[in-house]
Amino acid sequence: MAYRWNNNLKDADVTPEKMFMNRRALLAGMAAATVLPSISNAAVETPEPNSWEDITSYNNYYEFGTGKGDPAANAHQLTISPWSVRIDGMVDNPGDFDFNDIVSQMTIEERIYRFRCVEAWSMVVPWNGFELADLLNLAGVKSGAKYVAFETLNRPSEMPGLRYNVLDWPYVEGLRLDEAMHPLTIMATGIYGRDIPKQNGAPMRLVVPWKYGYKSIKSIVRITLTDKEPPTSWNRSQPSEYGFYSNVNPEVDHPRWSQSSERKIGGGLFSKRIPTLMFNGYEDEVAGLYAGMDLEKYH
């Protein structure tokens, strides 16, 4: 029987939905606290309740624009049904896999994954989804494959951000095969018990919890098995800032910010920063993947 990760995070650990999704209000509060330091903590620490529309209004998804509110404003144009994912390269059964067929075959294994995530703060997010390994096994990975390449939809008629040369489109990402086959690596189809909104990567996106904020390719249309390290969009755009591996590593700073500490979401805007955990808290599960590697060189 295949190894399955035992999820030890409970419902009580989950960050409240409104608090997780309403990052716009949190950042606005931080800005207000910076500009107006005399405001009391109580006045800025607790965001106002928000609707589902409000709480999905702060996203990174450059295909819909570089502003944090652009994806929510523009993603309604995206057609996500029908949807298929092409799996090709070094596989036994290449082809276009219908999204609904994929989900129906994964129903038994699809479950809630409560993953610890880190951006400017730490949180626990409940994703609905299934292990990427299960999807790759549908196509049959050939001996000799070493990497998995991913590609996002490239549809300028529905994705206005593609009109601008911010990145070399389509958006691409990659993992080493052992990273991709790890039981912590999932294809997410839902969040907080709902289908993923279009601006968050519908209908299917990658979630790699020890690389959260780095390896989060959305609206995937192609997965390719290869024996060569594939390009990744941010590494291709800014190689000095984004390496292929992109682990959450408190000992290796991004050139423009530190990974060494974080704040827990819900702890208040003036809460004490805490040390970031190696591999985002999943060191016991994934450190073996990088045994003997220079993690500063292979950042």
Image (cartoon, helix red, strand yellow):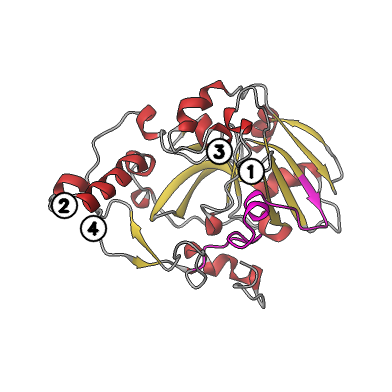
Residue lying at 40% horizontally and 55% vertically, measured from the top left: 120
Q: Secondary structure at mark 1?
A: loop
Is there CB contact under 8 Å for labels 3 and 1? yes
Q: CA distance from mark 1 to mark 2?
A: 40 Å
- Residue 224, by quadrant, is top right
x then y, percent, for residue 130: 60, 43
Q: Kindly report the distance in space between the C-alpha atoms of the residues bearing marks 1 and 4.
A: 35 Å
Q: Give SS at disc 3.
A: helix
Q: Which residue is mark 3?
A: 62
SS for dot 2? helix
- Disc 2 marks a residue whose amino acid type is Asn
Name the amino acid type tagged 3. Answer: Tyr
Indicate which disc, 3 or 1, sits on the residue closer to the N terminus.
Answer: 3
Instruction: Name the residue that disc number 2 marks.
Output: 41
Q: Amino acid at mark 4?
A: Phe
Q: Residue furthest bottom?
A: 292
Q: Residue at x 64, y 72 (%)?
A: 297
Task: Specify the principal SS of the magenta part.
Answer: loop
Quadrant in the picture for the C terminus: bottom right
> Is 193 contained in the magenta span?
no
User: Magenta segment, which residues?
Assistant: 224-249
Question: How many residues crowd mark 2 within 10 Å: few (<14), some (14–19), many (20+)?
Answer: some
Instruction: Give the residue type at disc 1.
Output: Leu
- Whether 225 is among the magenta residues is yes
Q: Residue beneath label 4, please?
A: 270
Of badges 1 and 2, the one in the foreground is 1
Residue tagged 1: 167
The residue mark sitting in front, 2 or 3, is: 3
